[in-house]
Amino acid sequence: MEKWTIFKKASRFGVIPVMLIPVVLGTVGAYVWQGVFHPFLFVITFVGAAAAHLFSNMVNDLWDFRNGTDTEAHNTPEAISTNSGFLSGGMMRESLFALLTWGLLAVAVACGLLLSLYSGWEILWFVAGGALIAYFYVAPPLRFGYRGKGYSELAIFLAFGLMPVLGAYFVQTGEFSLKPVLLSLPIGLLTTLLLFNHHFLHWRADQQAGKRTLVVVWGERRALIFSHVLLYISYASLIVCVLLDVLPVYALLALLTAIAPVHVYRNLQPQNASAAYLPLMGASQRASVRCGMIMAVALLIQGLV
């Protein structure tokens, strides 16, 4: 297998838009609200955020493998594993996988250090916070992704919503503001929904392995109700952004991206086979990416006109 193909599969490169779109949103916000855009800083932020996200993917695979969660997912009937399969399937040595994982973190930290020289040392809080969230999501002693108290959902919202949007805005402007915080709500909540929904694919295996996600703690029916509610809250926050003049009114076109997941929900029962949640995963990811793209384009159009 070609090296680049191996890397993309091992790092789950295909899901990287859920991190990069918030970075674009924060950068566009800085341009529209403050009239500043530094291309070099944007590129470094883009590369650093990408490396941080891929590190998060790989370190999760690494510790899920060490904790036995991935193996349990492969051994549980009907469970659909969401890891890369390189470790649990014996396709790559753990030592090499770990080397790639820590190499990505090194790239992310190097980008953060470089940005701190131009924008201010405060950006290092984002670097440190992101690294700690990514590592201790499944790594001992915290493993807060295993505790089933909502810690993992809060971490996802911070890491894929608030931190990249506000961080990208700070890199460009050197200051913080309430507007990028509000701008982060729709995309952060939709990405949280995406990560929440992926637990449905293997919640029985997680239960066997002792991974107490909210789906395991609440049970499938109650977790599915929460998934519905989180979708509606996500799009309600988009409306709030328009009402507070954070986004232009034509950003409400992003509400159309809710149609696909709502349609999938209607075909689900209180209890479903794991495979029944694959369409929900796809619809959730498309909603997150497309909503974020429409928000960014709408904001940019507002700035240009």
Image (cartoon, rainbow, N blue to C red):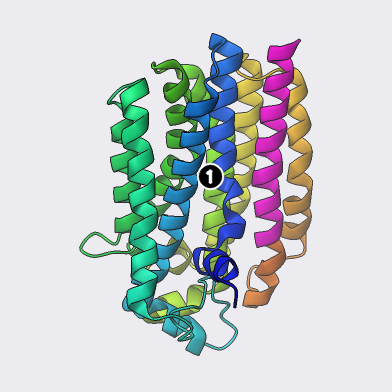
Q: Position of residue 168 (x, y in %)?
A: 47, 29
> So how many labels did they put on this image?
1
Reading the image, the residue beneath label 1 is 19
Residue at 60 percent across and 47 percent down: it is 17
Residue 69 part of the magenta segment: no
In terms of secondary structure, what is the magenta stretch mainly? Answer: helix
Q: Is residue 195 above or below residue 160?
A: below
Q: Is residue 259 above or below residue 253?
A: below
Residue nearest the observer in this picture, 26 or 5: 5
Q: Residues within 10 Å of mark 1 (few under 14, many from 20)?
A: many
Q: In the image, 281: left or right of 40?
A: right
Q: Position of residue 64 (x, y in %)?
A: 38, 72
Q: In the image, 270: left or right of 91?
A: right
Q: Quadrant of the C terminus?
A: top right
The kind of residue tagged 1 is Met
Q: Position of residue 13 (x, y in %)?
A: 57, 59
Q: Quadrant of residue 272?
A: bottom right
* Magenta highlight range: 281-305
Residue nearest the observer in this picture, 49 or 273: 49
Residue at 77 percent across and 22 percent down: it is 250
Residue 283 part of the magenta segment: yes
Local secondary structure at mark 1: helix
The residue sitting at the left extreme is 141
The residue sitting at the front extreme is 2
Residue nearest the observer in this picture, 149 or 18: 18
